[in-house]
Image (cartoon, grey):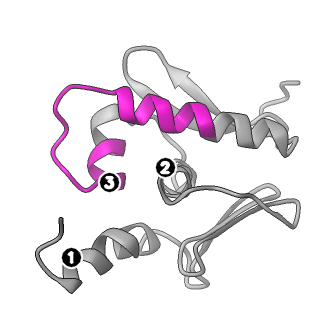
Amino acid sequence: MFPDLQTVRAVLFDDTAASTAPATGAVALGRLVVDQQRQQVSWAGQALPLTRLERDVLAALASPPLRVWTYQQLYERVWGADYLEDAAAVRSTVKRLRAKLRDANATVAVESARGVGYSLVDANSHGRH
């Protein structure tokens, strides 16, 4: 499925996401810490059991500055392929990610920008409950 080992490493260990993180290799939003170098995500010090796709989507959404990511931007960043106007893979991954954030009682959430994409919000910093 992959032409060479370098491609496999690029897919498994995407260095582009880590390049947006601080020197420590981690992005923090409140009690959420996304450490791409260690391939770990934690909420309030507890590791979250995320798949690579879920982790990479969350890393993109958490990277500063917080903004709305279009389906195309997320797909091309996380899957590393051209977006073909089908957001099903992104939606499915976000659905699983939202469930895992809820299960962890996280105050950060993936918010929909209808017809556009997603953004990450921290309910505590926006005064929402």
Alpha carbons under labels 2 and 1: distance apart: 20 Å
Dot 2, crowdedness within 10 Å: few (<14), some or many (≥20)? many
| First in residue order: circle 2 vs circle 1 | 1
Where is residue 40, by image quadrant?
bottom right
Q: Residue tagged by mark 2?
A: 57
| Residue type, label 1 | Thr
Q: What label sits on residue 77 in the rendered view?
A: 3
| Residue type, label 3 | Arg
Q: Which residues are magenta?
A: 74-96
Q: Which SS class for mark 2?
A: helix
Q: Nearer the viewer, mark 2 or mark 1?
A: 1
Alpha carbons under labels 3 and 2: distance apart: 8 Å
Q: Of 76 and 3, which appears nearest the observer?
A: 3
Where is residue 44, by image quadrant?
bottom right
Please say if 78 is above or below 34: above
Residue at image location 31% in from the left, 52% down from the top: 79
Alpha carbons under labels 3 and 1: distance apart: 15 Å
Q: Is residue 69 visible?
A: yes
Q: Residue tagged by mark 1?
A: 7
Compared across the picture, whether 84 is left or right of 42 comes to: left
| First in residue order: circle 3 vs circle 1 | 1
Q: Cβ–Cβ below 8 Å for labels 3 and 2?
A: no
Q: Is residue 70 visible?
A: no
- Residue 6 included in the magenta stretch of the image: no
| First in residue order: circle 3 vs circle 2 | 2
Residue at image location 51% in from the left, 52% down from the top: 65
Please say if 35 is above or below 70: below
How far across and how far down the image is residue 52, in percent?
50, 60
